[in-house]
Image (tube, rainbow, N blue to C red):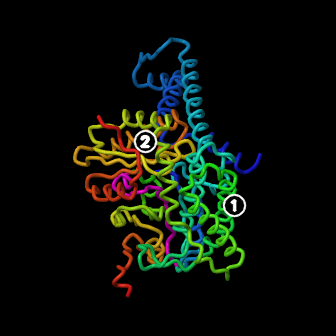
Amino acid sequence: MGKDLHYSIRPFIERALNSHSAVESIEPIALDDFYAYKVNRRRGMTSLVVVLSDDYHFGSASLQSKPPILKDGGFFLIAKPEASGFEGNEPNEKLGIGKIGKLLGALNREDFWNYEPPKKDEEK
Amino acid sequence: MNTDQIIKLVKLLRPKYYNILTRILVLGGLTLLSKPVWVDILNIFLSGFKFSIIGELDWLLGLIVIIIALTYNTIHRYLELKFENRSEPAFKHVAIKTASSFAELCQEILPLVKDNEYIFKATGPNSGSEEQEPLRTDLTMWEKLKREAILPNNEAIKKLISDNKQTIPAKYTDVFNQLLLHIDAFNEHIINPNFDYSEFQFPKQLPTIILSTCFQTAKTNQNLIKKVKWISTKLNKNYVSDWFIFGSAAFIPDKANDIDIAILVDKATTDQRKLNDNILDIKNDFKLKFKKDLHVSIFDNESINDYSQFSSKNPLKIDKPNG
């Protein structure tokens, strides 16, 4: 856990979120150990908290270190493009996990924690 | 006082939520300070209850404990803020103009080249066919960073090379000249997007030359050796099977913002909560001792393949010492 992210990453994510058709606005949340945003959505969907993980490998230890702000659910964003590891969800905790592409897909659903991106073959 | 200074002041005054020691000490101090009140209340139920540590001056002891706890917390926060890892375009951190050796020149150029590479990989055009990420259609950030970071980074690289030509070994002169041509062509392309710079590709041999030169120098860096020894004694050998240092610290240990370390843990024998606490302690101690962040990537034995792949992706790394 931490804030070890290249300076290009947050503006890139903020721009992607702000340009998303389901997003009304984003508000940064001040945390000591993570960058985080509250994402307010359109179409009557609830807002959600997105926390950025700076891990090179997202594994069980990353999940254990999630900040208390995600205790009621949210999206744990694997922010480093080069990061590897777990990209499943934790539906019982209403927690979505994944990279930016997955988050942008999940934002279209109220139950964002159940969203799985289509496989490459399915897209064709 | 600008906004940054105000934010720093607010952060400094706000105790970190995980600072358990501060909480315990402040609570203990408050207990002693408010002793007359709670002893009176307890005596409503338990007549004759007495409590004392140093007698009449318990309140003073309480006050001193609170002051010590808050001072400790403030120092901790100050150090954390002072040495906060701030990511910025690399050209802002070029430290030397004249290099005494080729290795020193490479260590100055590496962060600039890496910064450009990262911007390209994170925000630049991707083909979509080989990438795992979806095809990027919005290239606004890429266009912005080309001008605000890559262009000045390139200028800094050019200046470093032209000021230190004499340090470049003859066998590498052509490669560095190709880099200068690439930079000029790329810069021209930024100003005039119709300019085709495909004839002036980034020289593919350059990263290998720079990385291996920096790595050979870093391996003998005394500060890095000290850190490796320190980490080695702190990591619990009962559950950490393997670890290595990778990333910028393995190439430019004195300039790196933090130390990246990958550890492989034996999940079967590890209490995850204890492990996290142990890692957190090590990170805090490391920051206090070396004034740098320790950034830990943890792989459990279910991710052993990921660990091996990660290790292969980082062939130039500082392995854990034997024994």
The residue tagged 2 is B280
Q: Residue at x 59, y 44 (%)?
A: B101
Is B299 rendered above or below residue B71? below
Residue at 53 percent of width and 41 percent of height: B292
Q: Does the segment drawn in magenta span residue B147?
A: no
Residue B24 location (% of width, % of height)? 47, 31
Q: Amino acid at mark 2?
A: Leu
- Look at label 1 and name its amino acid: Glu
Instruction: Look at the image and give the residue range highlighted in magenta.
Output: A44-64
Numbered marks: total = 2
Is A47 within the magenta?
A: yes
Q: Position of residue A61 (x, y in %)?
A: 36, 51
- Depicted A71 relative to depicted B276: above or below: below
Callout 2: chain: B
Residue at the disc numbered 1:
B155
In this view, which residue lies farthest toward the left? B268
Q: Is residue B86 visible?
A: no
At 59% from the left and 60% from the top, the residue drawn is B176
Q: Are marks 2 and 1 in contact (CB under 8 Å)?
A: no
For this rendering, which residue is in front, B204 or B227? B204
Pointer 1 local density, CA inside 10 Å: few below 14, some 14–19, many at least 20: some
List the single residue furthest toward the top.
B55
Q: What residue is drawn where x is 51% and y is 33%?
A: B289
**Residue furthest out toward the bottom:** A124
Disc 1 on helix, strand or loop?
Answer: helix
**The quarter of the displayed image where residue B84 is located:** top right
- In this rendering, would B137 be left or right of B150? left
